[in-house]
Amino acid sequence: MKVKLNLPAVFIITILTACGCSNQFKHGNAAIEPRKANDLDVTTSAPIVHTISSDISSVIIIRLKHDMDLLDGLKKAVKQQNIKNAVILSGIGSLTSYHIHVVDSTTLPVEEVFPKANVPQDLLNVNGYVIDGRVHAHITFSDEQKALGGHLEPGTKVLTFAIITLGVLEEGANLTGFDDWRR
């Protein structure tokens, strides 16, 4: 479904901002896998704050059914709609399992952990970007006791349904490198 909008969208990114907290997950049978990035090749000529301006040319609403992998479904929709650059505006639904990664250090390159579990969760939010056709999504989800979130990984499965809304940026908007910490 496409809805035509002409809304201004301004995106600001602050590069190399370090988070001062360590994320640790203890959730029933949740597994945590550590990982560390390989190289520290930070480009010093990149501006600390970089902005672009773009109108939203259309809104795409995606609905995923039971047992669909959330990340795979987003990737398929982006490819099907031939989306190059977009903002993931929102997402809701429920999950049978989750797999995310989160930062676990305050130094560059950051260390990451990969919590995952096969437990029912409410999907509270999906946000992020499509950058040059590549999905970079984060999710927030909860059970009756707490909310968790992080970078979406393969293995996050839909329970009832998931609805995700994308704001497609106008032709010429270029988000290349916005999610590369070395720039």
Image: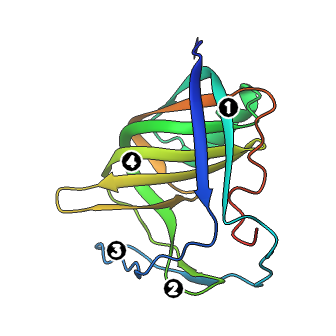
- Compute the Cα span from label 1 to label 3: 43 Å
Q: Earlier in the sequence, mark 2 or mark 4?
A: 4
Q: Residue at x 40, y 80 (%)?
A: 21
Say whether marks 3 and 4 touch (CB < 8 Å).
no
Looking at the rendered image, the disc whose residue lies closer to the viewer, 2 or 3, is 2
Residue 56 or residue 143, whichever sits in front: 56
| Mark pair 1, 2: CA separation | 34 Å
How far across and how far down the image is residue 14, in percent?
59, 62
Say left or right for 27 vs 140.
left
Give the Cα separation between the discs numbered 1 and 4: 33 Å
What amino acid is labelled 4 in the image? Leu
Q: Earlier in the sequence, mark 2 or mark 3?
A: 3
Distance between mark 2 and mark 4 Cα atoms: 28 Å
In front of the other: label 1 or label 4?
1
Which residue has dot 1 on it? 54
Q: Amino acid at mark 1?
A: Ser
Q: Secondary structure at mark 1?
A: strand
Which residue is under mark 3?
A: 29
Nearer the observer, disc 1 or disc 3? 1
According to the picture, the residue beneath numbered tag 2 turns out to be 105
